[in-house]
Every structure is written in C-alpha cells, then in structure tokens.
Image (cartoon, rainbow, N blue to C red):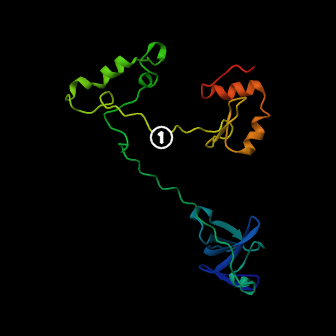
C-alpha cells in the first residue's frame, strides 16, 4: 500500500531514516498499515523491526539526508563467535602419560618428595645395562680448565677486575669502589655469603 506522510509518499520498500536512541539510522519500510509503518534497520536483525506511527516525528524520508551528504549509521548484527576446534590429543604430551594429583605431589610420605643419594640415582639410571665402553656421566672425566676462573662484582654482577683488600668485595670499576667503601659491615657479610666467602672482620 501507499501512504502519504508529511506530504511525502512512503510505501513498502521505501528508504527512510528512523530516530532511535540518540541518532538517526538507515531503515526500510517492509510493511504498511493505515496508521503505521513497519521498518527494518539496514544491517540489523529481523527481531529489531518495529512499528512506528505515521504521525511520529521519529521517521522521515530517506531523501532528506541527501542534503547532509548521507552516511547515516547502519546497525551491525552481532554474530556469535565461531567455536575453536581443539584437538582431542594434545601434540606436545604423550597420550600414555597421565598426571594425577597423587603423582604431582610426589610419592613420599605426606606428599613430600623423597630425596635419593648418589648411589640410588646411579642405580636408577640403569648404567649396568649399557655396554662397558658406552660413555656416561660417570665414565667421562674432563680435565681441569686452564683458563682463569671468572670473578664478578658483588654489587652489579658485572665482571670484576678488582677486589677491595679490606672487605674482600669484588667490584668492576672505580664507580663501584666508591659504593663498596660505604657498605656497612653487616651488609658486607651478607654479600660475601652469596659466594661462600664470609670472613670475620677485625
């Protein structure tokens, strides 16, 4: 049907603009009654369609936006997120390996881990099943290094070139040396404990 509203001819399929919320939206007339229009918002879902009285000032012809350059907002239909496919078997874990609450807490009494001495650790490795000439951590011995051991600054962790004769703290440069001289005695002992070099200061 055809209906005259505000001296404009509006019929089914006509492009209109509908005021909803705080803005004008592009819409289309999908059904006409003697006193109402059913409008469908462009880009919106069908359940957002609504009936608007022909005398309402919320609706106007779509051509009225031409003077403003158009570009009215369109409703965007919300789409449900696509489900993500998760593999049944995680590739980085063997299917035969299962982690239970009991195994994660340890096999010791009260969930505490049992400590093994060196002899038990060697037995658990199964070295006796290997050939006699097979290299293992027990049969391979490395000679002592001929390079001097590196020393590091007790304050910054940089490579230390110098040692304070009074406190035995190691430092990297003259800038760190100025800080070493300001360190109190109890702090010196704590720093030396980190590398097992505690001494009794006199």
Picture residue at 30% right of the left edge, 25% below the top? 125
Picture residue at 59% right of the left edge, 70% below the top? 43
The answer to whether 179 is drawn above or below residue 68 in the figure is above
For the N terminus, which image quadrant?
Answer: bottom right
Assign a secondary structure to mark 1.
loop
Q: Nearer the viewer, residue 41 or 124?
A: 124
Q: Nearer the viewer, residue 142 or 95?
A: 142
Picture residue at 42% right of the left edge, 33% below the top? 144
Q: Is residue 31 left or right of residue 9?
A: left
Q: Position of residue 27 (x, y in %)?
A: 64, 74
Q: Quadrant of residue 106?
A: top left
Q: Quadrant of residue 158?
A: top right
Q: Quadrant of residue 103?
A: top left
The answer to whether 30 is drawn above or below residue 2 in the figure is above
Q: Position of residue 18 (x, y in %)?
A: 71, 72
For the C terminus, which image quadrant?
Answer: top right
Q: Position of residue 5 (x, y in %)?
A: 73, 80
Q: Is residue 100 visible?
A: yes
Q: Position of residue 134 (x, y in %)?
A: 23, 32
Q: Nearer the viewer, residue 183 or 63?
A: 183
**Number of numbered markers:** 1
Return the residue at label 1.
147
Q: Is residue 2 visible?
A: no
The answer to whether 132 is drawn above or below residue 72 in the figure is above
- Outermost residue toward the left? 131
Give the class, few, some or many, for how many residues have Cα within 10 Å of label 1's Cα (few <14, many ≥20): few
Q: Nearer the viewer, residue 145 or 99?
A: 145
């Amino acid at each position: 049907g055809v209906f005259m509203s505000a001296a404009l001819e509006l019929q089914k399929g006509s492009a209109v603009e509908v005021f909803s919320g705080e803005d004008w939206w592009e819409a289309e007339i999908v059904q006409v009654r003697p006193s109402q229009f059913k409008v469908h918002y462009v880009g919106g879902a069908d359940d957002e369609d609504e009936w608007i009285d022909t005398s309402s000032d919320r609706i106007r012809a779509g051509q009225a936006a031409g003077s403003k350059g158009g570009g009215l907002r369109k409703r965007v239909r919300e789409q449900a997120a696509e489900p993500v496919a998760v593999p049944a078997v995680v590739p980085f874990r063997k299917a035969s390996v299962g982690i239970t609450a009991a195994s994660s807490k340890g096999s010791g009494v009260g969930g505490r881990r049992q400590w093994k001495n060196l002899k038990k650790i060697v037995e658990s490795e199964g070295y006796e099943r290997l050939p006699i000439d097979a290299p293992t951590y027990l049969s391979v011995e490395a000679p002592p290094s001929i390079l001097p051991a590196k020393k590091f600054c007790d304050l910054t962790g940089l490579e230390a070139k110098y040692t304070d004769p009074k406190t035995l703290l190691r430092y990297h440069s003259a800038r760190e040396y100025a800080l070493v001289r300001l360190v109190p005695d109890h702090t010196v002992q704590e720093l030396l404990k980190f590398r097992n070099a505690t001494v009794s200061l006199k």
